[in-house]
Image (spheres, grey):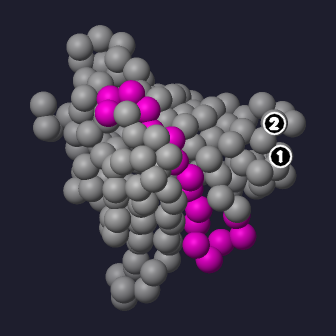
Amino acid sequence: MERKTKVNAEEGKQELTITREFDLSLELLFKAYEDPEIVEQWMGTKVLKLENKKFGGWQFQTSDAKGNVVFQANGVIHEFLPNQRITRTFEMENAPFEAQLEFLEFEKLTDDTSKLNMHIVYRSVGLRDQMVKMGFAPGLNMAHNRLEDIVSKLK
């Protein structure tokens, strides 16, 4: 099965570009990134904080069945333009990775379809290459599939 979420990592560059077309209106796609309840569903994580505004913060946490925290990430939202763009930092806690800068752009294709363009910048080529080697692309594709499935029911 072909992955709908495309990850492009050019050799020697410290960035990634990620694109995905969704069978969702622009408004519904954007809502999947701004509504904490929807974010929790498609990301499979708890939203501890999501302040959708310039200089707002966000924090997500995932725990195992015993309540042990297995993943925690946070950052600052630097730009928040509804149905257009979110610029934010992303940092995993208790992980050897430095903060990254993410530019999310939301694009209307038709009344019922939209596109997400992500540009992620890392401090170095080496850090970017580590992320690529971790094999996050299949997981991101699965998360985007869940996003589309969950949010399409809101139509």
- Looking at this view, is 104 or 145 the one in front? 104
- Looking at this view, is 20 or 31 the one in front? 31
| Residue lying furthest top | 110
User: For mark 2, does the 10 Å Cα neighbourhood hold few (<14), some (14 to 19), or many (20 or more) residues?
Assistant: some
Amino acid marked by disc 1: Val
User: For mark 1, does the 10 Å Cα neighbourhood hold few (<14), some (14 to 19), or many (20 or more) residues?
Assistant: some
Give residue 125's mark. 1
Amino acid marked by disc 2: Lys
Residue drawn at the location 23% of the way across and 14% of the way down? 111
Measured along the vertical axis of the image, is residue 19 above or below residue 54? above
Residue drawn at the location 87% of the way across and 36% of the way down? 12
Do residues under tags 1 and 2 come within 8 Å of each other at their CB atoms? yes
Task: Give the quadrant of residue 9.
Answer: top right
Q: Is residue 105 left or right of residue 23?
A: right
Inter-mark Cα distance, 1 to 2: 6 Å
Q: Secondary structure at mark 1?
A: helix
Say whether residue 68 is visible: yes
121 within the magenta span: no
Dot 2 corresponds to which residue? 13
- Counting from the top left corner in percent of width and height, residue 48 is at 34, 69
Q: Which residues are magenta?
A: 82-97
Residue drawn at the location 51% of the way across and 59% of the way down? 75
- Counting from the top left corner in percent of width and height, residue 6 is at 56, 30
- Counting from the top left corner in percent of width and height, residue 36 is at 27, 56
